[in-house]
Image (tube, grey):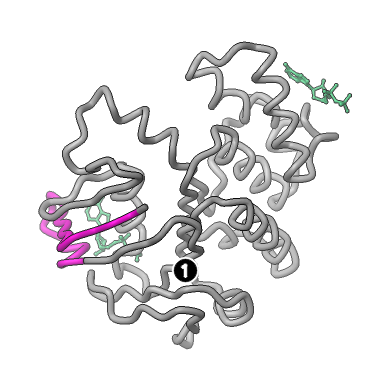
Amino acid sequence: MIEMQDVWKTYPNGAHALQGISVKIDRNEFVYIVGPSGAGKSTFMKLIYREEVPTKGQISVSGFNIGKLKPRKIPYVRRNIGVIFQDFRLLPKLTAYENVAFALEVIEAPKKIIRKRVMEVLDLVGLKNKANRLPAQLSGGEQQRVAIARAIVNNPTVIIADEPTGNLDPETSWEIMQLLDEINFRGTTIVMATHNKDIVNTMRKRVIAIEHGNIVRDQARGEYGYDF
Ligand code: ADP
Ligand code: ADP
């Protein structure tokens, strides 16, 4: 599903963010990416959704060689990957409905199909009755639910979540984790960078630890393993 072979990433300023990463993530896995700030976690994720390209090495996602992708194929691959961020990144002037619909409008899905599918995913995340609210009229947890609805509306095979609970209180964080667990259970691979020790140690999944741009630990049903 996701495979990296000796992947290196050096930014133009000379920062060596990743230094020879090799890893395989299978279909349907739920993987936590942990490690100190600046370790390379975000870069690891950005390479998967092709926000960045590797300096060296091979990355394949769902059979596509991501590093060598022809520009016209990029949207096609991106559609296959849903992304969720710590700061939600919703469009502030669009309603919850419109934020989710947007992802389908850009691929020119028929209006009737858009409406049906958007209400279906808003229902799945528990926000069907708040479809007309603007992001500012929703709580943080609700905004993250909208972002999750937007991420899954195209039926992606992979969800990349970069600290999805970083801005949420513990109780709301657990609600978001339950939702991600449910989405994983329905057949979507999830790769999630997190600093949330409680979540990693309670909701046990595969743990990949990155330090100084290298994978230093890879455990099935692992632990968080840090004091921060
Ligand atoms: P993490 O997500 O674990 O905090 P990052 O992947 O964001 O780590 O960063 C890894 C290293 O790459 C850090 O040294 C960081 O300063 C550097 N870095 C990240 N993004 C950029 C960028 N766009 N330009 C230059 N350096 C960057
Ligand atoms: P219900 O099944 O509860 O009747 P609806 O499908 O009528 O729900 O829609 C739920 C909410 O989503 C309503 O507030 C509705 O106005 C809003 N909504 C539905 N379609 C659109 C749209 N195309 N643009 C903006 N909001 C919409």
Q: Residue 77: x and y, percent?
A: 36, 35
Q: Nearer the viewer, residue 108 or 27?
A: 27
Residue sitting at 28 percent across and 27 percent down? 73
Question: Is residue 180 found left or right of 132 in the rendered image?
Answer: left
Residue sitting at 49 percent across and 19 percent down? 106
Give the vertical position of 75 relative to 225 (above or below). above
Q: Nearer the viewer, residue 6 or 228?
A: 6
Q: Which residue is mark 1?
A: 32
The answer to whether residue 7 is magenta is: yes
Q: Residue 207: x and y, percent?
A: 44, 75
Q: Residue 124: x and y, percent?
A: 74, 43
The answer to whether residue 8 is magenta is: yes
Task: Give the magenta-colored segment's residue range.
Answer: 2-21
Q: Nearer the viewer, residue 163 or 26?
A: 26
Question: Is residue 116 found left or right of 212 in the rendered image?
Answer: right
Residue type highlighted by circle 1: Tyr
In the rendered image, which quarter is residue 15 located in? bottom left
In the rendered image, which quarter is residue 175 located in? bottom right
Q: Nearer the viewer, residue 182 or 143?
A: 182
Question: Is residue 161 found left or right of 167 in the rendered image?
Answer: left
Q: Residue 32: x and y, percent?
A: 47, 68
The overriding secondary structure of the stretch rendered in magenta is: strand
> Farthest residue in the right direction?
129
Give the vertical position of 223 relative to 63 (above or below). below
Q: Kindly state the secondary structure of the residue where label 1 is placed.
A: strand
Residue sitting at 58 percent across and 40 percent down? 152
Is the residue marked 1 within 8 Å of ligand 1, measured from its CB? Answer: no
Ligand 2's quadrant: top right
Residue sitting at 64 percent across and 60 percent down? 181
